[in-house]
Image (cartoon, rainbow, N blue to C red):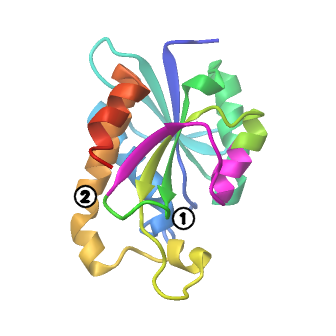
Amino acid sequence: MNSNTWLVAGLGNPGPGYSRNRHNVGQMVLDEAAARMGGRFKTHKARAQVAEGRISLGGPRVVLAKPMTYMNLSGGPVSALARFYGIDPAQVIAVHDEIDIPFNTVKLKLGGGEGGHNGLRDISKALGTKDYLRVRVGVGRPPGRMETADYVLKDFGSAESKELPFLISDAADALEVLITEGLTAAQQKFHGGS
């Protein structure tokens, strides 16, 4: 296994109709990360868009991947890329939307449950483990009685859209700290007092 290479999967749905949905915030974060690394996404045979680079000069190699399957089928591309690049699940990071934390909040964790997130469930099944890292990007809970699926498949509201660039930047920062300094350092920096 290649212990100095990280696979970062930004979860979402393919196509322009989904690109600004809450469910696609993971892919928005990867666009920011790729821009910072000077990487460009290219189509990979594993049914994903992939950009390769380094977080910092002399830093670890990073493979950014946006699965081009629908969210609920994210596991196939992620596990295929992990095999292709020889990356252990411990070096896999899923960047995804999270309704259980407030909008404008980023949390990080290793393993644990999927919280009803079908993209994570499919990755856990395909990797054969839940022990991979997650960058959880808060999108907040649906208002009133709105179904969760309807909520995450809607674009961010106008007030949220003004704050969205800051949230994406924070999540990309958290991803960099996670890769370069480790989970504990990233949690201490981004979890604040909560």
Classify residue 124 by image quadrant.
Answer: top right
Query: What SS does tag 2 mark?
Result: helix
159 left or right, relative to 117: left
Q: Is residue 192 visible?
A: yes
Can residue 54 be seen by looking at this rendering? no
Instruction: Name the residue located 34 percent from the left edge and 15 percent from the top edge.
Output: 59
Q: Position of residue 60 (x, y in %)?
A: 40, 16
Q: Could you tell me which residue is drawn at 33 percent across and 43 percent down?
A: 191
Of the 4 image quadrants, the one containing the N terminus is top right
Q: Which residue is label 2 attached to?
A: 165
**In this figure, which residue is indicated by the disc labeled 1?**
15
Q: Secondary structure at mark 1?
A: loop
Q: Position of residue 39 (x, y in %)?
A: 37, 34
Vertical side of 99 occupied by 142: above or below: below
The numbered disc on residue 24 is: none
Q: Quadrant of residue 111?
A: top right
Q: Residue at x 40, y 54 (%)?
A: 28
**In the image, is residue 107 part of the stretch drawn in magenta?**
yes
Residue 56 is inside the magenta segment: no
Q: Is residue 63 above or below residue 17?
A: above
Circle 1: residue type: Gly
How far from the left and from the top, in percent, is residue 88? 64, 21
Picture residue at 64% right of the left edge, 27% below the top: 89
The picture places residue 51, in percent across and down from the top left corner, at 46, 35
What residue range appears in magenta?
Answer: 105-123
- The amino acid type of the residue labelled 2 equals Pro
